[in-house]
Image (cartoon, rainbow, N blue to C red):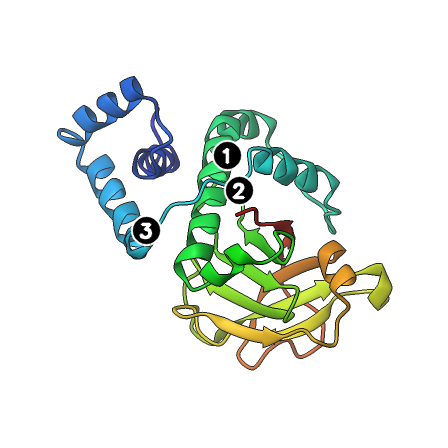
Amino acid sequence: MTTPDDIDDLAGEYVLGTLDAAERAQVAARRLRETALDAAIRDWERRLSPLNETTAAVAPPGDLLQRIERQIDAEKISGATVVNIADLQRRVRTWRRLAVAASAIAASLVVAVGVREGMYRDQTQTYVAVFAKDDVLPAFYFTIDLKSRELTIRPVGAERQPGKTYQMWIASDQLGPGPQSLGLVDDTLAPTRKSLTNFDPNLLQTATFGVSLEPAGGSPTGKPTSPALHSKLLPVSH
């Protein structure tokens, strides 16, 4: 039986261009007779339409997916997690495709939003982190220029939540136990910029970053009050 999640996954693969030629032709034919699939495809196209403003494409490093997978394997997950093995196996193929697509999107956006001058710097100066849950469109991605130590967080699939705000975090053994706040995400529709000049560049390269949904005004405890999306930095090769 085809579920709404199956339809949404297939629509995402179709719009992102991760299907092979035969699969794409099948989906194109199906959308003509399946209104739910056609609506899902149109919704993905609407969400990704801002990416059409990119001025140039840039291919991610060839080993980027492998590095992301290694990071995921090494990530320490706090709290109890129940995993449905059958569902996980069903989603492996979709996750791998969307992970590649998300990496390409992030790399393309880095170019499109004004980091073109970074192409003339040392390749290790610009880093990116993608924040996504399961196989959905990434909620946010970070870029950090280690030379200026300016962090820019850009919303991709994040949605506004009434009475809530997104908050950024950094965690490292060098900073002591628990994450430290990097401040609030100003707007889910526009980039937020933060100065990280009080952090050593070497620490930033190895730290874990997070984004959590908090009450308006930020966490009242100084720590995340809801499960956070986690990621680490990866260098952007130009």
Query: Going from the N terminus, do you reach mark 1 or mark 2 first?
Result: 1
Q: Is residue 67 left or right of residue 90?
A: right
Residue 182 at what x, y percent from top left? 65, 73
Residue 22 position, x and y percent, is 28, 17
Label 2 sits on residue: 134
* Left or right, 41 with reference to 69: left
Is residue 7 among what the camera can see? yes
- Sequence-wise, the earlier of marks 3 and 1 is 3
On the image, which quarter does residue 158 sit in?
A: bottom left
- Residue 138 as seen in the image, left or right of residue 6: right
Q: Is residue 55 above or below residue 6?
A: below
Rendering coords of residue 141 (x, y %): 52, 57
Circle 1 residues within 10 Å: few <14, some 14–19, many ≥20 = some
Mark 1 in CB contact with mark 2 (< 8 angstroms): yes
| Helix, strand or loop under label 2 | loop
The residue that disc 3 covers is 48
- The amino acid type of the residue labelled 3 equals Leu
Identify the amino acid type marked 1: Trp
Which residue position holds label 1? 95
